[in-house]
Image (cartoon, helix red, strand yellow):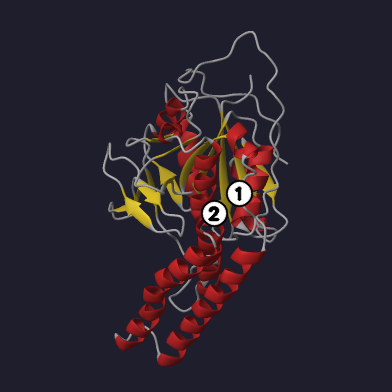
Amino acid sequence: MDPQVSIVVVTSDRLVDLRRCLASLRAHLREADAPRTEFHTVHAPHDEAAMAMVRAEFPEVQVHTAERRHISVQRNLGARAARGEVVVYLDDDAWPHAGWLSQLWRAFADERVVAASGPVQRGDGSLQCERLASSPIGRLVPLAAGQPLPAGFAPSFSGCNLALRRRALFACGGFDENLSYQPDDMDVTARLFAHVGRDPAAFRYCELARVTHESSPGPYRRTLEDRAWFVVARDNLYYACRHGGALRGVFGGVAMQVPKLLRFLAWWWRGKLGLAAALRCFGKHLGGTLVGIGKGLWRTPRLPLRPLPPAAPTTASAPPGATEATCRRPQPV
């Protein structure tokens, strides 16, 4: 039988974290109410050691190599490879809690639901991501349980713990490949929200679908100085201009970056960075802000996925919550 859920882990340069993530996912298959599941890892081209580890230690996982290290390209590759009705994205430096997968799958019993997520906590147990809404320029606000969306806002789910109905993801074009690091998750949920006519019932927040995210060092996040400050600013300004429009995107997006620019000077003042390092970070972030404005105003979104053909009629289908926990999978590639 085909899988009901496809779990996609986008990864690069984190062999130890990836091993822990996959071992945790394997344990979820043993839960009595787990859906039929397949696993995919999507690696950067240079990630040979991690790919060899996955093939040797997790033969049930399908291994894929993207053309480059790029979170949206890798996410879209995982979606193309997936066969499940629901695609679940999990970061390589995260691991789920008991019942996580069953809770996410259960949300899709409602045919209206196109996206589901749950809490993301840090390694120390504190809350990193909760029930959130995003404005057209990317301002995030927390929502209490049962609180309606503010006017003009969209639901926003973390890509570290994100389940999407595959057919809806393809219908809205997939992840925008103009976003190489962030906020790819905020962008895809905003576009999905528009795709379903801004219906809040299409987005389900599952309090029990919890993951822990360690935020390990990686290619975009090493030290305070050695971080992707240019990329972060560029991608956030692109988002603001694409969703907020020219005037609101530029002025509102830049206003949101001012406190972030000033933090580099604050870090220098507190001794966390030397003056030269603080100025380099400031320059990277400022440069990314300016490039992001141009990119957002003049570049069209890169949405490579196309709507899937109508599903062939079947005589029977397993409902959410089916107890069969494994399925036939092709050999790893």
- The tag on residue 175 is 1
Nearest the viewer among 111 and 322 is: 111
Mark 2 Cα shell of 10 Å, populated few (<14), some (14-19), many (≥20): many
- The tag on residue 285 is none
Mark 1 Cα shell of 10 Å, populated few (<14), some (14-19), many (≥20): many
Which comes before the other along the chain, label 2 or label 1? Answer: 1
Q: Quadrant of the image for the N terminus?
A: top right
Name the residue located 43 percent from the left edge and 22 percent from the top edge. 33
Label 1 SS = loop
**Which residue in the rendered view is the most extreme toward the front?**
247
| Cα separation between marks 2 and 1 | 7 Å
Q: Position of residue 170 (x, y in %)?
A: 64, 38
Residue tagged 2: 184
Name the residue located 50 percent from the left edge and 47 percent from the top edge. 190
Nearest the viewer among 270 and 186 is: 186
Q: Is residue 132 above or below residue 84?
A: below
Q: Is residue 293 above or below residue 126?
A: below
Identity of the amino acid at label 2?
Answer: Asp
Q: Position of residue 282 (x, y in %)?
A: 46, 82
Q: Quadrant of the image for the C terminus?
A: top right
Q: Position of residue 153 (x, y in %)?
A: 41, 49
